Amino acid sequence: MRWSGLCLTLVLATAPAHADTVPAGPPLAAPIMAPCEADGCKREGPTKLRRTGAVFASVTTGLFVRGVGSYLIGEKRTAKRLALVSAFGLGAALGGGLPVGISGGYPPTLPLMPVLLVGAGALFTTWWADIGVAAGVSTLGNARTQAPWSIELATLYLSDPYRQAGLGRLGGRIELGRLDLGASYLLDAENELRTGEANVRVRIFGAAATGEVVSDGSRLILRAGLRGHEDDGDRVDTTTAELALIGRLDLHRLDRGLRGAFIEMSSGIGVERVSHFGDHDNSSILLGTFSWGVYLGNRGEVQLFYDHRRDSMVGGIAAGRAAGFVGSLGASLDWMFDPKWAAHLEVDVGNAWLTTVALRYRGGTR
Amino acid sequence: MRALLFVTLLCSCTRPAEGRAEDELAVGKAEIASATVEVKDGLAAIRDLSDGLLDLWCGAPAIQLAFAVPDAGDWTIIARNSLSDSQLIIDGAPFDRTPDGPPTVATFRVALAAGNHTLRVAPPDADRIEPYRIVAMADIQTALPIVDDVFEMISAVPDARFVTAMGDITERGTIEEYELFDRQLTTLTIPFYTTLGNHELWGGADRFFGRFGRASFHFEFKGTAFTFADSGDAGIDPIVESWIDTWLVQAIDQPHIFLTHIPPIDPVGLRYGAFRSTRDARRLLARLAEGHVDLTLYGHIHTLIEFENAGIPAFVSGGGGAEPMRGDGIDRHFLILDLDGPTQTVTVVRVD
């Protein structure tokens, strides 16, 4: 956590800001800027054939040669910067991963795991970002902050190897100054599975939750969480306490060709106490996520993400010979269809499939 | 594009061991014109069935099989991986093994009348409840060429009856590795019963099943129950879990040892050398605790850790010779288990 925090802080502090960093901007009806024109980067777009080829190259060759998609559509500077960040990621992944791997997971090397995750995050998110540039989805919109307060009602469908379950979740949050307080309760249709969760987020850096469009959605947040989980079917009760650092970087800070896209990473640690028929097990959890996303107009965002934790309902992907070492993948869409209302759609794939459809009331917005 | 396809396939599959579990049910069954064999509970792999020859690899100290022959004839029955004092009992009549051959290869030459026969290969004391000693180990992998060192030390352990193993006997599951493993086993004077590990899956589980039998199986010996479970994909398939549920009920009043390759929960949680779903892991442990399991044995992490899970004593013992964890000072080792009813005394023996 310490390392990932340092890395994110370093990136946030040193990356060139090509856009205004006003914390809040005009409301929905008046977008801050047409994404690309503001930086004077308007030019003839690539032909459809060239773009298709670039997307194909970025998906295939791009996994190993970062930036090839951007390069092929003429965004050479973007390609170069993506390659640089991925090189940093490769270095961090090797620096964090080699001691852990070579030692066979010797416990004193495990504090390097967050470095490995941040490195892997930089590697994968730059790959996804390159595909996004090649496909032309990186210039779609601007960031919008959360509403000052919100209430969310969600329905979830879980399909894991052992069961299918429909669940409901009610949650809410409110930002008070730099503090964001949130809580939620999850219940399945049979009342066999119950999860209550409370979170406190401290906004270290970034725009306040006004619900308005901002020119930069970059932020750094410290999250402390407490979760209680009861599963009558599995006959297990779990209590988890977590602390994590979450950073988002709007990629126009890296290169103007990446305007409208962002990456987000988090890392932290958790402790859990599990009750089995009167016996208790205590354990630790490594928290780590990374994602790449794009803003959709001024109304929302879409993200692809990786989550390293295995204690969620989703668990880790059955990744062949690497099963057990790999977490889950997911995609989410947040879409504000009315100034007061937004929808959240999410699919998570790991040991299970989890689909979430949520309706959110955005309180305190104009 | 292939990488994308691979990721898509991985994501679409939440039960990678389902087919494997179904395939296990075919273990121990064979049929030719002159004979039909079915090993009870799949506790032996049939390596060869031809006119006059039945060649078995035993997966338990005591196995029973139904053997039907349409015509009377002479049969050679080879029970590989059996205890040195094993007898063959056919329809209640005992037959002694031929005096030649390695201690774990019991050969019997018998004349069978036409009809259905019940055969049992077991030592005379298999059902006598009294203290005894076994050995446990896991994770041989790249040390396969030198594992005979370990086997020689195990063979020298006084009164040890058999070895239980928690998988990863090969590095890549190749046929050459399995053949080498077979040759190395000739240095071991007691049987070796194992589940598979994630490394066996590199080569396909059918190679394992064909040679060593089931990966998820259960047997009892001298009053103690042993359950081996396939966790090669870092999880237990629901089919295997249903078998485990049955075995837990069967052995609820007996001392019970549970063995699987990957620990459900890594004792150092944030390392994640464990099941891919913590919730499934907790679910399994709750079942084992409710089933009064007395000891759990795991491999996968190449070190030695003694801990408790769900109140059940547990060992991670990955000292078969695979690349060891560096820095912990623990190299090749195995465990000696002295079993006396519900009491298990575990002694660590270091090879290097």
Image: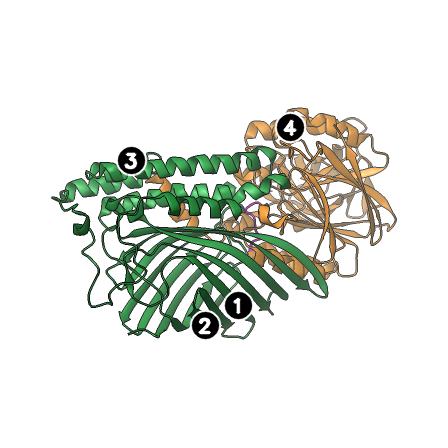
Pointer 3 indicates a residue of which chain? A
Q: Mark 4 belongs to which amino acid?
A: Ala
Please state if B252 lies on the left or on the right of B270 as rendered. right
Residue carrying label 3: A80
Specify start and end residues of the magenta stretch as a single range: B232-237
Residue A138: give x, y in percent of width and height: 25, 50
Residue B143, numbered circle = 4
Q: Main secondary structure of the magenta part?
A: loop
Q: Colour of chain B?
A: orange
Which residue occupies 56% across, 57% down?
Answer: B238
| Cβ atoms under marks 3 and 2 closer than 8 Å | no
Image quarter for residue A7? top left
Q: Which callout, 3 or 1, points at the residue further toward the start of the chain?
A: 3
Residue carrying label 2: A171
Name the mark nearer the viewer: 4 or 1.
1
Given the current orientation, which residue lies at the most extreme left position? A44
Q: Which callout, 1 or 2, points at the residue further toward the start of the chain?
A: 2
Q: Mark 3 belongs to which amino acid?
A: Lys
**Mark-to-mark CA distance, 3 and 2:** 42 Å
Dot 4 crowding, Cα within 10 Å, few <14, some 14–19, many 20+: some
**Mark-to-mark CA distance, 3 and 1:** 42 Å
Residue A63: give x, y in percent of width and height: 35, 38
Which residue occupies 19% across, 57% down?
Answer: A33
| Cβ atoms under marks 1 and 2 closer than 8 Å | yes
Decide whether residue B235 is among the magenta residues.
yes
